[in-house]
Amino acid sequence: MKHWALVSLGIFALPIFAGVWEIDDAHTAAKFKIRHLMVSNVYGQITGAKGALDMDDKDLTKTQGTVTLEVNTVNTANEKRDAHLKNEDFFDVSKHPTITFQIKKVVKASGGKWRMDGDLTMKGITKPITLKEVELTPTIKDPWGATKRGLTGVTSLNRKDFGLTWNKQLDGGGMVIGDKVDIEVAMELKEKTEAAKN
């Protein structure tokens, strides 16, 4: 999958940074893809992101942080389908309103990319997952003076591992929806100012 464009291009990259980077929820999402009727894919996204990452560019393996998504924001461009995803057959939003990813370990991978191992909690179930092909952009200054950067990564999971087990069998064999979910994460991060830290 192609990565989403995260930030507007800046003319000058800023020096190496160490500190806390808050998630810009207006420009952050988890985009997903799942097989439908064994012939096509359904695409959607979940937004409403909150959290922060504590990162040191000199040693990204020390990165810590937690990202939370509001499940009620799930959007597949179909209101009826979105309503079904929110009920007890799938996410059961009334009982489990958020999805959380807590970073446990960051490891350098090939090609200048990284791997983030962590715990994903969805529908009250926590399982380890790995965010792969993680890329972190250089820092820039946006037109309003804030220091920004982007982070992307991809992963896959089996929805049944997290209690999303609803399905129906097709007359000719096979199931209405697949079990594997491909996910692409795109985050825009804003440096937390010293004034805000104190």
Image (cartoon, rainbow, N blue to C red):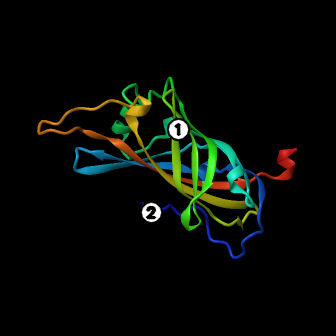
Q: Which residue is drawn at 63% across and 46% down?
A: 105
Q: In which quarter of the image is the C terminus?
A: top right
Q: Residue at x 67, y 67 (%)?
A: 138
Please provide percent x and percent y for residue 183: 45, 49
Please provide percent x and percent y for residue 17: 77, 61
Q: How many other residues sit within 10 Å of disc 2, few (<14), some (14-19) or many (≥20)? A: few
The residue that disc 1 covers is 128
Q: In which quarter of the image is residue 113?
A: bottom right
Please provide percent x and percent y for residue 13: 72, 72
Q: Which of marks 2 and 1 is in front?
A: 1
Q: Which residue is drawn at 50% across and 61% down?
A: 4
Q: In which quarter of the image is residue 118?
A: top right
Task: Note whether 128 is above or below 62 in the view shown.
Answer: above
The residue that disc 2 covers is 2
Name the kind of residue labelled 1 in the image.
Pro
Task: Note whether 110 is above or below 56 in the view shown.
Answer: below
Name the kind of residue labelled 2 in the image.
Lys
Q: How many other residues sit within 10 Å of disc 1, few (<14), some (14-19) or many (≥20)? A: few
Label 1 near label 2: C-beta < 8 Å? no
Q: Which residue is drawn at 22% across and 50% down?
A: 39
Q: What element carries label 1?
A: strand
Total numbered labels? 2
Q: Is residue 146 left or right of residue 163?
A: right
Task: Note whether 98 is above or below 38 in the view shown.
Answer: above
Q: Quadrant of the N terminus?
A: bottom left
State the residue in front, 176 or 84: 176
Residue at the limit of the structure toward the left, as seen here? 172
Q: Quadrant of residue 102?
A: top right
Q: What element carries label 2?
A: loop
State the residue in front, 44 or 83: 44
Whole-angstrom CA distance, mark 2 to mark 1, is 24 Å
Q: Which one is earlier in the sequence, the residue at label 2 or at label 1?
A: 2
